[in-house]
Image (cartoon, rainbow, N blue to C red):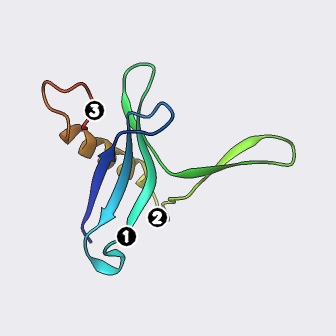
Amino acid sequence: MNIFATFEKPTRGTAVAEVKLHFQDGPLTGYSLEGFSIRTSKEGKIFATMPSRNYTTQSGEKKYWDLVRFEGQGDGKWTLSNWIVSEYQKTQGADSDNTPF
């Protein structure tokens, strides 16, 4: 299955870019998975966030439910996050202002 990422200027929040993953072949051909974003930490490190929804427990604690879940063993979530960051960095030129648009 071939997947590629596109990066768009964010419409809200503090994201550097909004990310869509597009499927090129297989049963998901023509579909895209949205809700990822590229952000920068206070230390200046670039990282990717996964799509999630927030909810509040009965005790009032705010929690998040990840919509993309890794079912195997190991650090699959970080593999995807690192891949998204790597693809984003490929869009950056030497004279870039850190935005691909």
Q: Please tell me how crowded label 3 is: few (under 14), some (14-19), or many (20+) other residues with Cα within 10 Å.
A: some
Q: Residue furthest front?
A: 11
Nearest-to-viewer mark from 3 and 2? 3
Question: In whole angstroms, how far apart are the C-alphas of marks 3 and 2?
Answer: 33 Å
Identify which amino acid the numbered label 3 is placed on: Thr
Nearest-to-viewer mark from 2 and 1? 1
The earlier-in-sequence mark between 3 and 2 is 2
Badge 1 vs badge 3, beta-carbon distance below 8 Å: no
The earlier-in-sequence mark between 1 and 3 is 1
The residue under the point 35% across, 80% down is 27
Identify which amino acid the numbered label 1 is placed on: Tyr
Question: In whole angstroms, how far apart are the C-alphas of marks 1 and 3?
Answer: 25 Å
Residue beneath disc 1:
31
Quadrant housing residue 2: bottom left
Residue 90 image label: none
The residue under the point 48% across, 30% down is 14
Query: Which image quarter is the C terminus in?
Result: top left
Under circle 3, the secondary element is loop
In the rendered view, would you say 48 is above or below 1? above
Question: In whole angstroms, how far apart are the C-alphas of marks 2 and 1?
Answer: 23 Å
The residue under the point 41% across, 39% down is 10
Position of residue 43 measured from the top left corner of the image (x, y, whole percent) = 41, 19
Residue 72 image label: 2
Front residue (pair 50, 79): 50
Horizontally, is 34 left or right of 9 in the view? right
In the rendered view, would you say 8 is above or below 45? below
Under circle 2, the secondary element is loop
Position of residue 64 measured from the top left corner of the image (x, y, whole percent) = 64, 47
The residue under the point 44% across, 34% down is 15
In the rendered view, would you say 41 is above or below 30? above
Query: Which image quarter is the N terminus in?
Result: bottom left
